[in-house]
Structures are given as C-alpha cells and as structure tokens.
Amino acid sequence: MTPQEQRPAPNRAGHGDDSGSRLPGIWTRTLGELTLSYVPDAGVAMIPSRVYPSSDEEDWSAHPAHMTRAGHLSMGCGALLVERGGTRLLIDAGHGRISGEELEPFQHGFDHVRDLPASLATLGVDPAELEMVAFTHFHGDHTGWARPDAVEDPRSLFPKARWMVGKGELESVAPGSGPVLAGQDERAVIVTDGTEIADGIRAWSLPGHTPGHTAWVLDTGDGREVVAFGDALHSPVQVRHPDWEVCLDTDRDEAERSRRRLVDHLARDGVYGFGVHFADQQLGTVDGSGHWRPWTDAVDAS
Ligand SMILES: [Zn+2]
Ligand SMILES: [Zn+2]
C-alpha cells in the first residue's frame, strides 16, 4: 500500500432500524494514474431471498459478514467519481430524491445515508462543472440525480454533462414513460463495447441485467485496471453463485453469461472490481479460490 492509498473509513451508522448497517462513508483511493472516490447517496436493506429467488435462508446464514443483525442484505447506492489525468467524470448518479416510504417488494428498508449532492460538496466537486456522467444502466437507483425531476433545475444536478449510455439502454425503457435522463435526446451519447469515452476509460458491454448494461474499465496507467461493473453483480456473495438470477434481470441467461465473464475477468492478475451495491466491500478482486477479496487485503497482498 503506497502512502496515497487510503483505507476507506467505514460508516456503520444505522439504517434507522438499528440492525447493523455496513455502509461506507466517502472514501478516496489512488491507484496509478487513477483516483477513485465513492460518492454515497443511499442505503438499502434487502430481503435476500427475494433479490435472489433461487437462494434460501440457509445460503445466507453462511454469510453474516454481508448481513445486518436483522438478517437483511446491506446494499449501498451512490456513484463513483473517477479522476484520471485531465478527466473527471461520474459513473452513475445515485438513487435520487426519493423518500423511501414506498419500498420495493425485495426491500426491507431504505435510507439516505448522506445524499449525493452533499457527498459531492464534501469531495469539492461542483456538479454543474462535470462534463460527463457514464451510466451502467437505466434503473432508478443509478440515474437518480440525473433525472429530469431530480432537482428544481430541469437540466438536473448536472446541467452541462453529456450522458454516456450503452447501446440498447434507451430502447429498454417502456414506451410512453418519458425520458429517463434530463435533456436525454440532446445529451445522451450512445456507446458500444470498447468505446473509449476518455483517455483510459472504456465501455465493456455486459448485457442481461438490462439490454444495454455497461461496465466501465478504468486503466490505472501502470498495467492494472478497475472495472466498475454496475449491477452485473449485486453482492460479494454472488461472486460464488453466478448462477443466481437477480429479480430485476431482464434476460436471465444473458445476465448469467455476463456474470461468469465478469467473475473470470476479475480473477486475473491486476484486475480489481468496483461494485456500487457491495456495501462496505465495494473495491476488491476475485481470489484464486473464486471468492471476493476486499480491497485492503488485495492491496496488502500485492
Ligand atoms: Zn439494476
Ligand atoms: Zn442497482
């Protein structure tokens, strides 16, 4: 671990249900030419057997490190700030301004741990100056603060940003439901597999969770890479169970193929993953026995 690589400071403050949330606060890590910061927005306590219908309670009882004390799966929602050379961009845009009063059937609880605009302010980032937001996909927990109704300004929290969106994602939205993103017609840039949107930052098409689901591959400049893989995986536990479908996957077979490709890739030397929903284990790699190994161990071992 080099001096500028700081360990994340976990924030175990609760969900409101006092069940032992495992959500991190803001952290910043530097890897080669890459500086990554987690921008927290919300936390969700999930009902694991509903998120993963083919899993059962016994499966989850073996993984207390990922659960709240009440037996729910902790998941974070937020964004990843990427700084590389002269480029500064955000991957995804958090959950947005929703109250959490209306829970999805697979959720037990929802809370804004710290909203994304406040997190950006703490990081010294003016969202009005950001020129690019790259989306993994169009689910609401990833587009939140970029939606037309996110803030009073109809241009959203990011009035200047171009929206980088995987091919097929715009078409995945139900007809008549209106634009997902503010100024979508003028501001969305469609990218395909391998498209480099900035120096050392390229798209990797991993469809299945949604038709245009896209991971972002971030080159460290020293032979390593970080893959921000969105909802190709929702929990470190799923790394061992790529066959477990997720209740929101639009194409289960394709989603499983993408998960297996991703897990194989993360097992390579010098490849790290960022899982935006991975609670307090967002950065890590897949070790030789096929388990998720969180970042601090991975860095210390190198
Ligand atoms: Zn999703
Ligand atoms: Zn998600």
Image: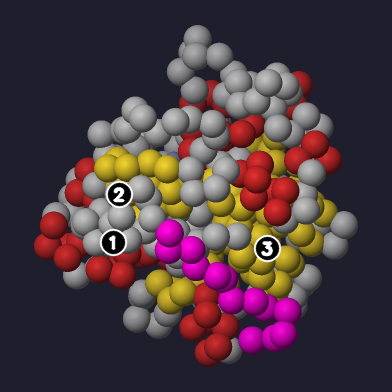
- Say which of marks 2 and 1 sits in front: 2
Q: What percent of the width, then of the height, locates residue 96?
A: 55, 34
Q: Is mark 3 within 8 Å of ligand 2?
A: no
Disc nearer the start of the sequence (3/2): 2
Q: Which residue is mark 1?
A: 67
237 left or right, relative to 196: left
Depth-wise, is mark 1 or mark 3 nearer the camera? 1
Image spot of residue 150 (x, y percent): 61, 26
Which residue sits at x=66%, y=66%? 28
Instruction: Indicate whether residue 209 is drawn in magenta.
Output: no
**Where 294 sits versus 38, above or below?**
below
Magenta span: 1-13
Q: Please indicate whether residue 293 sits to the left or right of residue 72 in the image.
A: right
Amino acid type indicated by mark 1: Met
| Image point (65%, 25%), residue name | 151
**Mark 3 touches mark 2? (CB < 8 Å):** no
- Dot 1 alpha-carbon crowd within 10 angstroms: few under 14, some 14 to 19, many 20 or more: many
Q: Which residue is mark 2?
A: 17
Can residue 2 be seen here? The reply is: yes
Farthest top residue in view: 176
- The verdict on label 2 being within 8 Å of ligand 2 is no
Q: Nearer the viewer, residue 253 or 111?
A: 111
Q: CA distance from mark 2 to mark 1?
A: 13 Å
Could you tell me residue 246's position as x and y percent?
A: 31, 45
Image quadrant holding the C terminus, namely bottom right
In the picture of the structure, the residue carrying the numbered disc 3 is 36
Q: Nearer the viewer, residue 198 or 254?
A: 198
Element type where label 1 sits in the image: loop
What is the three-letter code of the residue carrying label 3?
Answer: Leu
Q: Nearer the viewer, residue 218 or 149?
A: 149
Image check: 171 left or right of 125? left
Q: CA gap, disc 3 to disc 2? A: 30 Å
